[in-house]
Amino acid sequence: MGVWVKTKYTGVRYREHATRKHGIQKDRYFSIRYKHDGKDREEALGWASEGWTAEKAALELANLKNNRRTGEGHHSLQEKREAEAAKREAEERERALAEKASTPFAAIWKIYLEQCNLDGKKSCDREESLFRLWIEPVIGKRPLKEVTAFHLEKIKHAMSKAGLSPRSIHYCLAVVRQVFNFAIRRDIFDGANPTMKVKKPTADNRRMRYLTHEEAAALLDEIKARSINSWRICLLSLHAGLRFGEIAGLTYGDIDLERNTLWIRDPKNGYSRHVPMTATLREMLLDLEGKGNDDLLFPDRNGGRRRAMSDTFDRVLQALKFNEGITDDRQKVVFHTLRHTHASWHMENGTDLFVVKELLGHRSIQMTERYSHIGQSTMRNAIDKLADAISERS
């Protein structure tokens, strides 16, 4: 291009293209010059073939000067272009989100379920059944943006009418909530999760059954006679209060024999913790064959992480008749009963509730307070014994 040529408008100039023409004249490239923050500044506008003229350039410059004088609008072309680009990006994001939000719930569910399977989530089959029977008929074909609390109430009503428990209904709504949260995290949906506007059915489904020392001993003896690994797993839950998932994830590197602790990494609540070992646990772990730090203590048959307790446990419960004649699920013995028993024994022995919370890895003290009635019973017995002793001496 040639040299800059001034126009009759102050601050506006142009250069001509060496060969290209616009009409009968050579194409001209316009720019404006002005002071900004005390410094000379020049910004390019564009070609005459793109619609720019000296008059249009002068008007643009006048607008910028007026903006600087009033303190409003853009003070430079760069600011203006950046703002316009940001606006276009925002509009594009809104358009993309609106398009994604029009995706049927069932399509998002499919992606969610694939991710759950990849993550090895144990409840995939249960969630898939709830989706097929109760969720899909109501909102499967409905776009995410159109799912409202009204539709979720319909799911609640249908399940309740079919005689399902409040716990099952609560679980079903939790699945819907997880799918929406999944969509939000993936930038597929940016609205409010409709499950937040639905009142969850309430039910007291806390397991209150725990084993006596005699029952626990009988259970461990019978399991040990059938499967040494099942016995080891049960011992870890009973003596350390571990969840099954925490036991399944234990590696040889998590055992600290010097400090007599187990390192529980990335548990259900997300807070890793150290758990002290009893002498019995230490002795049991010493009997395990030493392997690499990253090797699982109790791998499945394929060397991977176990997803469920062995059927041996259920067969032993049946043999010992622990659940015979019991219809209330809260009173039935299951594997989690061992963790519950661990906490209950602590409370019987007068362990502080906060200490029990830390040992179990609960996120809040409210989760641990379910055991407080056991501690209160122990204290009541202690007071009664003290009262008897006072009466005998008076």
Image (cartoon, helix red, strand yellow):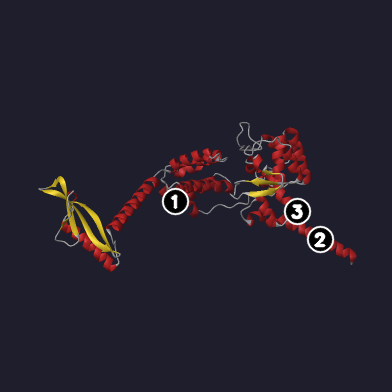
**Crowd tier of the residue under label 1, counting other residues whose Cα lies within 10 Å: few below 14, some 14–19, many 20 or above:** some
Q: Residue furthest right?
A: 393
Residue 73, percent from left and from top: 29, 63
Q: Mark 3 points at which residue?
A: 348
Q: Which circle, 1 or 3, is nearer the viewer?
A: 3
Residue 335, percent from left and from top: 68, 42
Q: Mark 1 points at which residue?
A: 148
Q: In this view, does 97 lie above or below 298?
A: below
The number of callouts visible is: 3
Viewer-proximal residue among 130 and 291: 291
Mark 1 belongs to which amino acid?
Thr
Q: Classify mark 1: helix, strand or loop.
A: loop
Q: Can residue 7 be seen in this view?
A: yes
Which of the numbered marks, if any, corresponds to residue 384? Answer: 2
Estimate the spatial distance between the alpha carbons at disc 1 and disc 2, rounded to whole Å: 56 Å
Q: Which circle, 1 or 2, is nearer the viewer?
A: 2
**Reading the chain from its start, which is encountered first: label 2 or label 3?**
3
Contact (Cβ within 8 Å) of mark 2 with mark 3: no
**Crowd tier of the residue under label 2, counting other residues whose Cα lies within 10 Å: few below 14, some 14–19, many 20 or above:** few
Mark 3 belongs to which amino acid?
Glu
Q: Is residue 209 visible?
A: no
Estimate the spatial distance between the alpha carbons at disc 2 and disc 3, rounded to whole Å: 15 Å
Residue at 24% in and 54% down: 44
**Crowd tier of the residue under label 3, counting other residues whose Cα lies within 10 Å: few below 14, some 14–19, many 20 or above:** some
